[in-house]
Amino acid sequence: MSTRRILTILSLSLLLAFSLFLAACNGETVAPDAPVDDPAVEQPVDPPPPTDDEDIVLSIFAGNVGMELELSQRAAEAYMEQNPNVTVRIIDTPDFVEDRLGVYLQLFEARSSQGDVFQIDVIWPGDLEEHFVDLYEYGAADIVGDHFPAIVENNTVDGRLIGIPWFTDAGLLYFRTDLLEKYGYDGPPATWDELEEMAQTIQDGERAEGNQDFWGFVWQGNAYEGLTCDALEWIASNDGGTIVSPDGVITINNPNAAEIIDQAAGWVGTISPPGVTGYGEEESRAVWQAGNAAFMRNWPYAYSLGQADDSAIAGLFDVAPLPAGRGSPAATLGGWQLAVSRYSNHPAQAADLAFFMASYEQQKIRAVEGSLNPTIMDLYEDEDVLAANPFFGSLYDVFINAVARPSTATAPQYAATSSLFFNAVHSVLTGNTDATTAFEELELDLVDLLGFPTGQP
Ligand code: GLC
């Protein structure tokens, strides 16, 4: 009989050490020794339903950016209230997408049953599908119709639903309303050129008034997936394409793409801190939320944190579409899904937990408290959600028109494609090369990796 259930947050190292220990003791943490791509090794889809006296422990591998962990914990508690025989553990995973992917791959390679539910990035279904169950086998057909069709399609590989959509993301421009007014600007910049000019003017003015730590524009410049997102926005907004086109043509080696990356390299050390080439989302937010930047590129999660009582800029900022280059503004599509491992010992219960966490009620809590964008369309008409995040309504078009990274066209080589891309961009930002040269070389590397034809966007 289940009595006390304690929500345990295990540190990742502890968990991994523990799994190695278990493996050493009894070799039981890995699934049967059979090829991963053999459908015959799939776990039984219909294990006997749990009984009252059978306790089940489910582990969710989840993110911890902004309020994510706290919100997941609360959802887990709510689920445990309703399912007294289940204990849910939230396993906190690294912020950077590559690091998180590395942790997951280690478990998958060992076919470890340590993780039941995994928070997976919108770019991962194609690369990782072999490790997850088909959620249609657990009743997803009844709920997918509530979610944005494009995300459901993104999460479907060969007819299998790899993840239930959890929250969606799109890149936004955060701007200081008080400072725009102070320096005589009517509204946020429409182009990158305007942003440069405004950022420089405000930065000069704020420094002259004594704030030496003030910068014009902060963003994600580290060599990681976040830079792929930022750079794709710059390039797509300058009519430079999407690295690889949806029909599998390598388009990155073009003058519009190179032009805007060279322009962005000029921001480093002028309107952006020299250290921006080491920034992820949270480093940018730290500078911004302390009141030390006029503009920030970030995802919606930074909104509720910026408006919180402990924020130096509460009530002093708003969000807008990102500026454009030669073309129209572009926001990269981000977001996370919940997937169930095929190595889980309790796939049916894990799917039930994933569906609960992605339900209307839970997505509403996450939207109101953490400004995490719902994937359930009706929530964009929910009064409480719109009151907490007015921009969910005013920028709705930005969310539904966000530009996808080329993860479907390049699967299962998206992670490798992105890594070549962000390293090429990073080498320009850090002044090691110019963008034309970097993209000529990148094109050759992508041809080697993908074997796709090259062309113009
Ligand atoms: C956000 C996005 C995700 C993206 C990541 C990059 O978490 O939701 O899709 O890959 O940022 O840092």
Image (spheres, grey):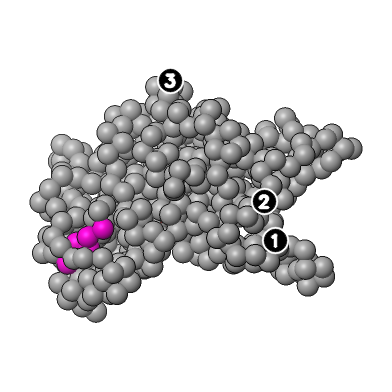
289 relative position to 163: left or right? left
Q: Mark 1 = which residue?
A: 31
- Label the magenta part by its dominant secondary structure: loop
User: Residue shown at 27%/39% (left/top)?
Assistant: 401
Q: Residues within 10 Å of mark 2 (few under 14, many from 20)?
A: some
Can residue 451 be seen from the camera position used here?
yes
Give how far apart the Cα atoms at labels 1 and 3 are: 47 Å
Q: Quadrant of the C terminus?
A: bottom left
Tell us which disc is closer to us: 1 or 3: 1
Q: What SS does tag 3 mark?
A: helix
Q: Position of residue 8 (x, y in %)?
A: 72, 50
> In this view of the protein, which residue sits in the foreground, 91 or 358?
358
Q: What SS does tag 2 mark?
A: loop
As shown in the figure, which amino acid type bears the numbered disc 1?
Ala
Question: Of label 1 and label 3, which has the lower sequence position?
Answer: 1
Give how far apart the Cα atoms at labels 2 and 3 are: 42 Å
Q: Position of residue 36 (x, y in %)?
A: 58, 62
Whether ligand 1 has any atom under 8 Å from the Cβ at mark 2 is answered as: no
202 relative position to 86: left or right? left
Give how far apart the Cα atoms at labels 1 and 2 are: 9 Å
Can residue 207 be seen from the camera position used here?
no
As shown in the figure, which amino acid type bears the numbered disc 3?
Glu
The span picked out in magenta is 248-253
Q: Which mark is residue 383?
A: 3
Q: Is residue 194 magenta?
A: no
As shown in the figure, which amino acid type bears the numbered disc 2?
Gln
Q: Mark 2 = which residue?
A: 43
Q: Position of residue 339 (x, y in %)?
A: 55, 47
Q: Disc 1, disc 3: CB below 8 Å?
A: no
Question: Of label 2 and label 3, which has the lower sequence position?
Answer: 2
Question: Of label 1 and label 2, which has the lower sequence position?
Answer: 1
Q: Quadrant of the N terminus?
A: top right
